[in-house]
Every structure is written in structure tokens, then in C-alpha cells.
Amino acid sequence: MTARTVRRRSGRIRVLVAATVLAVLPATAASAELPEPSDPVVTERPNDWPQPAELDVEAVVLVEGSSGQVLLEQRSEQRRPVASTIKVLTALSVLERTELDDEVTAGDEVLDVPGSGVDLQPGDTWTVEELVDALISRSGNEAAEALAVHVAGDVDGFTDLMEQDAASIGVDELELSSPSGLDDTQQLSAQDLATIARAALIDDRLRPFLGRTSVTLPGIGSVPTRNELLDRYDGATGVKTGFTSAAGNSLVASAERDGREVVAVVLGAGDDPARFDVAGELLDLGLDDFNTHELSGQLRLAVGGGSVRLEVDPVEVTAPAGREVGLDWPVAPRPPDEAPSVAITEGSGDDAAPLGAVPATLERDVAEPDPEGAGGDALGRAVVDGVYAGLRAAAVADRLS
């Protein structure tokens, strides 16, 4: 059972929720449209939350996979070169517009493509599935070029689609020029990549590609993934490596344990295995030192002529293990005319720290009209403020989970 208490503090009612720890499983996309990851309701991160010492990388972010809540970050909003990690967005844009068994015949676009490859030659015919395997697991740059031309006719047209798709999932104002990541003039932030990775992980067609430890490719046979984390880290589920001289060794990583999944982005790490070591440390932190809770509640207040009911639908909140989280209900001198925001806090009493806010719904239950006429109604309206004020301290949260 979920514990609950009600306290009055400084004109507010503090509802403390010892919330049930949830098993948050990845969702699946219900249609061919790009899945849009949810926005987190928790927007603040208290300074005393667990975190490692300063990490020797250019940027990192660790987020809760299901909600996107930031658990740790270091220069996560700064845009910089990200190399082949952009191929996760490439794959999303391809699978949005193709079928896995579609055949793609490579043209001259695959000639002289530098960097990592899968020996794709003009005239070779591969399926979309084989090319996406080459793209994700082997980071095949010529596979990216062939897919771009197949989908949009040329690379410029395809990168326009990538920009549109990124904007549709909340990554705005990108200027892309390469589906492979070889062009270091296109830049993304660690937070951008975390959002793209979350969209990929809830895409039921793309998700399996992200976690494959080996793939079988035409003319090559079985080859291992370049993402060593999939073999090194228990519970790893993806996602993509990247390297150029400007981007440094980078990695978008994800892992699942006990039903929870977290996503870590490491940009500009030193020589391998630094990016895998840092990602493993971040994933351990997210999965071992944090728990996810579901908060919801209903607050009903009697007023003259009826009642006012405030309700918060279930929201997901992640906090350090053992910390208390709850909803802090606003109770003003008068009943609210519009639905207020309800604060989410960690801790109790005067030490409670704000984490964010969630909108409540407001409903008014009106009592039956006075059978004698309008006199009773008028009286009810006249005393409503007094009744409401008198009941503030006795307000009851009559449903929490």
C-alpha cells in the first residue's frame, strides 16, 4: 500500500507520498509515425543528488528513459560535433518512410566515402534492414549515403527530412548536411542526442537494431557491433558510437534493469575505453542510486453551495533512492477560479526542495438548488469564502497512488 499523510504548512497543504517504486518499461510506437518522447515534469535537480566527480569528457547527460527527466548533466545543452551518433536520427528517418524488406540498389553515392564502412559498391542491392544493420552496428558511412538517396533522391533532401523529424520529437533548429556524421559543421548537444535516443528506443521497429551484438551482412557474413558496451555492460540495450577528430570518442548508451531504462550520452571522451567506462559509471548511477515513483492525488474541499475538487493525474518522478517525494497542494484564501499548478517536492517540512510542477484539473460540484428559491443560493455564495477558509486546514487528499 502507498503511505500518505496530510500536513498544513504556511497556507499550503503538503501531501507526502511514499510512492510505490514503479517498473517502468519502454513503450512501443503504435503507428509508423515518429514516436514523440514525453516531456519530464521534474525540471529541477537539487545539488545534493548523487553524482560522480567532474568527468573528463566534453559533455554528458543521464536521463530517465521513460520520462526524459535529467538525473545528471555536464554541459549537456552545448551543441558540438557528434560524429556517427547522428545515425540514430538517420535510421529513424529511414524507417519512417520505408519497409524493412524494401530493396536498395547503391549508386555512385557510395564511391569514395571515407571512414568506417561495409564495402558497399555501386550496383549492390541490399534490403533496408541490412543497410540499417550496417548503419547502426557497423557505422557504415556508405550505407547512410545509399539510404539517404533511396529515401529522398539526394543527400540534401534527406537531411531536410531529418531536420523535420528532429523538430517533431522536440529537437529544434538543427542544420544538418550529412546522414553519416562525417560533416563536423553539423552540431547537436548531449540533450539533443538523449531525446533522439529515447525516440528510437520507443520505436518498435528501430529498437531491435540498437541492441544487436552482431549482424550478418551480404558478402561479409557475421560481424560484431562497434558498440562494445553491449558486451561489456549487463543490461545494455543500445545505442550508438561515434568518432571524428573534432567530435572525439562519443557514445549514446542505454541500459535496463528491473524494468527501468536510462539513457546516457558521453561526448568528447579520451581514448577508448574511456567512453565505455564513463557510460557504465553513469548507467550504474542511474539504475542503482535512483528510483522512479508515480504520484497522483485528489484534493476535495467543501465550500458553500458545493465543493471544489483538484486532481492530479499520475505523473512519473525519479529521485535518489530513499528520498521522499510528494505533491504540495496550494490552498489560497479563496477557492481557485482556474486549475492551479501543484508543486512536486522532495523532502518534508521547511526543508522540502522544489522539483517541478504539474497542472491539476479543477471541478466544481454544485449542490442541489434551494427549493424555496434563490435565497439559499445567495446565502451559500455569501458564506463560501468563510466556509472555504475554515476548511483549509481540514482538507483531505482522498485518493493517492
Image (spheres, rainbow, N blue to C red):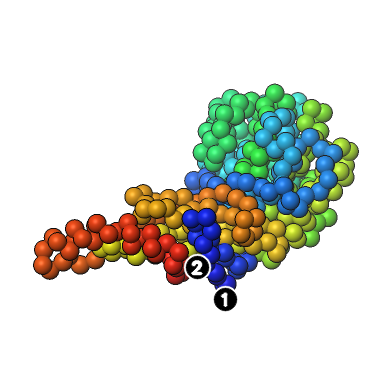
Q: Which of the 4 image quadrants contains residue 58?
A: top right
Label 2 neighbourhood size at 10 Å, few (<14), some (14-19), many (20+)? many
Up the image or down, 110 lies above or below 41; here it is above
Residue extending farthest bottom:
1
Q: Residue at x 53, y 35 (%)?
A: 167
The disc label shown at residue 64, or none? none
Please determine whether, in this image, residue 23 is positioned above or below residue 239.
below
Q: CA distance from mark 1 to mark 2?
A: 10 Å
Q: Nearer the viewer, residue 75 or 196?
A: 75
Horizontal and vertical percent for residue 45? 66, 47
**Left or right: 95 as drawn, with respect to 338:** right
Query: Which residue has dot 1 on it?
Result: 1
Query: What's the residue type where badge 1 is placed?
Result: Met
The residue located at (40%, 53%) in the rendering is 333
Relative image position of residue 371 (x, y in whole percent): 12, 68
Element carrying mark 2: strand
Q: Is residue 135 left or right of residue 37?
A: right
Look at label 2 and name its amino acid: Leu
Instruction: Tell me the residue at 59%/42% (across/down).
Output: 92
The answer, for residue 236, to whether it is visible in the render is no
Based on the displayed image, in which of its 4 quarters is residue 141 positioned?
Answer: top right
Q: Secondary structure at mark 1?
A: loop
Give the answer, above or below, for where 226 lies relative to 326: above
Q: Tell whether label 2 touches label 1 (CB within 8 Å).
A: no
- Is residue 400 visible in the rendered image? The answer is yes
Q: Which residue is mark 2?
A: 400
Quadrant of the frame with the N terminus: bottom right
Give the x, y percent position of residue 43: 60, 46
Of 136 and 60, nearer the camera is: 60
